[in-house]
Image: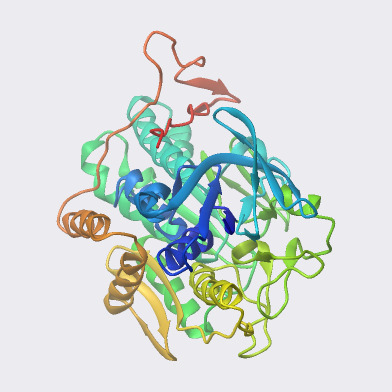
Amino acid sequence: MPNITIIGGGFAGATLARRLMGRLPPGWDITLISEDSYTTFNPLLPEVVGASIFPEHAVAPLREVIDVANGGRFVMGAVSAIDPDARTVSASTLVGESRFAYDHLVLAVGSRARIDLIPGMAEHALPLKSVGDALHIRNIVLRRLAAMELEPDPDRRALLGHFLVIGGGFSGVEVAGALIDCIKGIGKYFPHAMSDCTRVTLVHAGDRLLPEMAPKLGMAALRQLRARGVAVRLNTGASQIDAEGIDLADGGRIDAGTVVATIGTRPNRLLATLGVALERGRLGVGPDLAVPGLANVWALGDCAHALNSADGTVCPPTAQFAVAEAGHLAETLLAVAAGRATRPFMYRPRGAMAATGHLNGVAEVFGWRFAGLPAWLAWRGYYLALLPTLGRKLRVWIEWTWGMFFAPDITHIHFVRSGGGSGAPMVAQRRGLMVVPEMPVMEQPRQ
C-alpha cells in the first residue's frame, strides 16, 4: 500500500494531512509522526500568557485533526533517523524503537527555541515556544504578584513587579500587550501588590517594532503599547541576562524580576542527519518543495528554505506561509499519485497582523493598512478560521467573547503528582530575589 509519511504535527504537517485526507487514490495511506499528540497554534500563545484563553484552546489533538477514524494514522514518537535508501523512518515511541516504511516522506519538523543566544539566557530567561512555556510564564506572573503582597522591602517589590520582554517582533509585541492587560485586569485581586510598582518593558535591538510589517504599522504598534503603559526601548540590545535583569549592549542596565525572551530559533537536529546542505539552518528545497538529492522527500514550513515563485523571495517562517505551502504540497502529492507534472510554489501573501493588547492591533490585508479595533478583530478572525473543527472554533470564540467583559482568570495551576511532591521548594532564594523553580511538565492525556 503506497504510504505518505509526514514528520511533524505543527501548522504545516497537520494542514497537509488534513488536505490530503479523503483525496488520495484508493489504497494510499497517510501516517503522521509527531513528538506531541497535539498541534500548537503558536500565534495564540500570548493569549495563554495573558489568560485570555485556556492552554488547551491553543492546541488541537492530532488524532482529531487528521481524522484517524477515516483512514489516517497518527504515531506519537520522536524520529531519530531517516534512511532514504531503504525509505524507512526510525522513531522512539511509547513501546520502544519502531520503524516505518514510506513511499513519500514529508519533513515538517519546524524549528526549536534557541536559549543560548545571549549569555545567561538559558538560565534566567523564559522562552515562549510551546504551550508549556506560555502556562509557565502565566504562573510566574501570578507568583510574582503574590510575592509582592508579602514583600515588605519596596525595592524588592519593584523588582518583582517588573516584567521585561526581549524582542520587538510579532511574539514580543503580542506578549507585552497581553502581559500589561493581564496585570491590569487582575490587579484588583492583589490589592497589596502596589500596582504602581508593576511594569512591563519591551526592549528591541532594531529601530522600529514589527520589522516584518510596514514602518507606519510598526509606529502604530509602538503608540498603542505605550498608551497601554508598556515602556518600549528601541535600539536596545541585551548583552547579558541574570536573575535580576539584563545588561545592555551600550553599558546600561535594566533591573527586572522576570525576563521573557521571544528571540532566537534553531533548526531541528534531524535535518543535520540527512547529509544534504542546509540554507541558514533550513532545508533547501526545489520549486515544488522537493528536497534535491533525496528521492520522494519533501519539506515545508519553518524547516524549509523555499523560494516563492511569485516574487523570488524566500518564504518567511510564518503560519500563513506554512498553511499555503501545505495546500500546495497536497496538490503536488496528488499530482504525483496521478502521474501528472508538478508545479512551482507560488503564493501572494494576504498581509500580516499583530495584536497589541485588548481591542487593539495593527494589520495589513491585501495592501490595506489599518490599526486599532478593526485590526484586532481581523487578527482574531483569521486565527479562529485556522482552528480545526467547528466545536473548537466555538469554544475559543466563547472564551474570547467572555474575556471582552470579564477579568482574566487568576487560577495558578501547579502540576505535581499526589504523594510524590514537586521535588523542589515552591519558593527559592537567589541573590536576594524570589524566584520560581521550573514547573513540572504538564502531562498531556494520551491519545
Residue at the (42%, 49%) spot, across then down: 62
Residue 372 image point, x, y percent: 31, 76
Residue 431 image point, x, y percent: 61, 25
Image quadrant containing the C terminus: top left
Q: Left of 119 or right of it: where is 37?
A: left
Q: Left of 71 or right of it: where is 240?
A: right
Q: Can residue 240 be seen by looking at this rendering?
A: no
Q: Nearer the viewer, residue 295 or 308?
A: 295
Q: Is residue 241 above or below residue 386?
A: above
Q: Residue furthest top?
A: 419
Residue 27 image point, x, y percent: 50, 60
Q: Is residue 347 above or below residue 268?
A: below
Q: Is residue 242 above or below residue 296?
A: above
Residue at the (27%, 33%) spot, across then down: 192
Q: Nearer the viewer, residue 149 or 328?
A: 328
Residue 222 image point, x, y percent: 46, 72
Task: Write down the quadrant of residue 310 in the picture.
Answer: bottom right
Q: Can residue 335 be seen by looking at this rendering?
A: yes
Q: Left of 60 or right of it: where is 108?
A: right
Q: Nearer the viewer, residue 377 or 239?
A: 377
